[in-house]
Amino acid sequence: MVAGNGVAALELREVTKSFGPVVALRSGSLTVHAGSIHALVGENGAGKSTLVKIVAGVHRRDAGELRLHGEAADFHSTAESKAAGVAVIYQEPTLFPDLSVTENIFMGRQPVGRARRIDRAAMYAEAGRLFARLGVHIDPRRPALGLSIADQQIIEIAKAISLDASLLIMDEPTAALSGVEVERLFAVARSLRDEGRALVFISHRFDEVFSLCDQVTVMRDGAYVSTHRIAETTPDRIVAEMVGRQVDELFPKTPATVGDPVLEVQGLSAAGTFHDVDLTVRAGEIVGLAGLVGAGRSEIARAIFGVDRYDAGHVRMHGVPVPPHHPRASIRSGMAFIPEDRRKQGLVTEASVARNVAGVIRSGLGRAGLLTARAENRAAGPWAARLAVKTAALDMDASTMSGGNQQKVVIAKWLATDPSLLIIDEPTRGIDVGTKAEVHRLLSELAGQGLAILMISSELPEVLGMADRVLVVCEGRITADLDRADATPEAVMHAATHQLETHA
Amino acid sequence: MSDTQVRKHVADEHTTAEALLLEPSRMSPGRRAVNTVLRSREASILLVLLAVIAAATIKTDTFLFSSNSWRDLLLTPSILLLLAVGQAVVIITRNVDLSVGSVLGLTAYLTGRLFIDHPGIPIVAVFAAGLLAGALLGLVNGALVAFGKVPALVITLGTLYIYRGIVLTWAGSNRVNAGDMPKAFLDLGTRSILSIPVLTLIAAAFLVVVGYYLHSMRGGRELYAIGSDPDAAVLYGLPVTRRVLGAFVLSGALAGLAGVVFAARYGTVSSGAGTGIELQAVAAVVIGGVAIFGGSGTVWGAAIGAVLLVTINRALPIVGIPDFWQRAVVGALILGAIVLDRLLSARQARRLVEARDES
């Protein structure tokens, strides 16, 4: 039992949560005491964010116990958790872009004067005080639109502080902060702890966990693994508990001969999202695009494929320039793009597998403008077989399949266009650990057959296990180009978080 | 002016806009207020309105300078103004209410029926009945949108036809005539206080109350937050369902009131009263600078937009523009407002991003 004044500020016991066929949380347990900072660590997909969202009232748990200050709690909405004194700073800030930063902080509980009229002067003054306490220069009257991720994060923290919450959960608050900003945040976090509040701190940076936190809880594959006092454990032990398995097993990388450059990108820039991006992907090569959430990786991929515009730079396929902002030209040049959110952007979930697979090559299938189910099935058959999609028949709806099989259908769909480059964003997000390896094996095989693959992934083990080369993106710039041999977790995380240092 | 002077002037111009956007607190409160007002969409739309009035008055000075036309100038927009205020509140929450024309028709006919079926009913009670009936119809819209999770466009398009169907069935080929309604009620349509028509005063009173609520009350600000990012509003713990419901009830109530005003103003009500006016209300709101995707704009702008729309329709024939072009002008105004809106917000976003990249 760790130190505390008896009753825990937050206690979760064997909490479970599933989303359809995907089990996000098998058994989440966490005990946090008042006046302490508790680290929650685990790989992406370990269930941390789901756990946080259950405490925040975003999701309702399927089973298990949730106690706040010793009393059973069951939040139906974020408003309820907020009223109970829980403040959450999410990984991706959630601000109202049209409103001033001050309104963003005080929305719903603005200081009011006579007849419940909002006292704007008091509100701006209070926001000014909060920013001063946090040591930042943000004009309280400016709109939230256009703030950097770091500043948005600061607004979220100011919001939580002003809430006077007894439990503050920070989901990777430092991901996009510079060294100075992190120190400032830590000073605030410590002062909040010394006021007797409980803090939960989720981070991938062990130096931060060990310098800031009092206890640490490790999660893996949606389940609780262990809790230690920080003083009684080491980063190596934590890593071992986090991973808990050999990385090689999960990432069956088959060596492939690397051929000529397929995709060449030079000086690609889009104001406010990414700058001067140079990259090359060769035939048979898997290039991993690593970095933190919000670093601009997906935006780069979307610009290369032509979904989004860019201001400057060139994209070439096999040495031939690809016109900007023209996805169909990109497909014709041999690109295939599998977006991050495949349910929304990559798959017609209400349509059959065959129709999905045949969708992108329809122009070649139609006879006299008509499209028959038979023609679709004939075209889709070989691809689904090759990828071992486990669907009873090709006319089964994609929505009823598991995440892993859905992803395979999306891949099959694009392979049917016979691409020479596959851009894939977060290939295994929302896929059970067991089926992840199948997707990995498939990607590896495809590279072996000479396909060039640009893979975006937030899961460090996936990038390290799969990629021949790792490019690290930090705040819209490529900050490192590492060979498989040099790509260690430390090197990648360093490049992903220390842009200022490397560019200075 | 020398070249450097010009450049300096340009730089100054740039910094005022920039400062207003990035660091408004640096300015003195007075300068900030003046700049905010001068650069607002409401101010520019008001200028357009004044220009239209000026042009029409130069052509025929009776457009403004006769007691009758002065009254018309203020009185005619009052119905659309009420609808636009309610519509603005709904659009600010990233929804839309297309049923207001039918609600207006229903309560206008209800007004007539009340006077016919209950002779001697107090006028205040009729106003209350109109408001209440409109609010109920709005509640139906709101409940379907908020609980059914179906886009408001579809829901209110459906209720547009349903509510109109109710009026058609109820009224049939009957119509309410001026003779059916008491003189005191019809007098409201012509009476003025301090040379401002009573019906305009009623509409203006509601405008002021709603405008104040949106600007200075928590609930009002939450409507903006919901329209700005509905998902963030849920995460924030704002009472999204309740607020959206409230916005529709308000829009319905104001449309109901507009129905009563319609009866008082025109004296005759048929089952087709207010057909198509919902599109004018949306147009007024958009012209008035309320973003069609919610989150920004004011009812002041929507109100000026409503006055502008009505006034343009009256002014164009005077200026000598043929009928066909009158509609085209309104269309151009809507397109212009939307294009301007996109350009301005894109420019603002770009400026903010550039400022961030530089720092």
Image (cartoon, coloured by chain):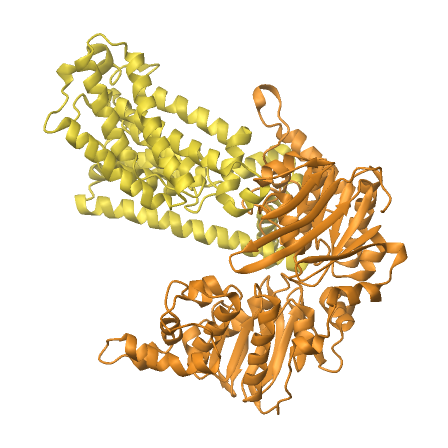
Above or below — where is A108 with respect to A216?
A: above
Measuring from the top left, give residue B355's x and y in whole percent: 63, 55
Above or below — where is A417 with respect to B357?
A: below
Looking at this rendering, what residue extends furthest in the right direction? A231
A291 and A320: which one is in front?
A291
Quadrant for the C terminus of chain A in the image: bottom right
Tell me if I can see residue B311 in this picture.
Answer: no
Toward which corner of the image does residue B136 lie, by quadrant? top left
Taking the image as shown, residue B52 lies to the left or right of residue B187, namely right
Measuring from the top left, give residue B64's x and y in whole percent: 28, 27
Measuring from the top left, give residue A240's x and y in whole percent: 79, 67
Q: Which chain is orange?
A: A
Toward which corner of the image does residue A159 lie, by quadrant? top right
Q: Which residue: 75% across, 64% down?
A: A242
Q: Which residue: 27% across, 79% down?
A: A366
Chain B, which colour? yellow
Toward which corner of the image does residue B62 lie, by quadrant? top left
Q: Which residue: 37% across, 76% down?
A: A358
Above or below — where is B68 with respect to B233?
A: above
B321 and B72: which one is in front?
B72
A162 and B36: which one is in front?
A162
Above or below — where is A429 with respect to B112?
A: below
A460 and B56: which one is in front?
A460
Tell me if I can see residue A33 in this picture.
Answer: yes
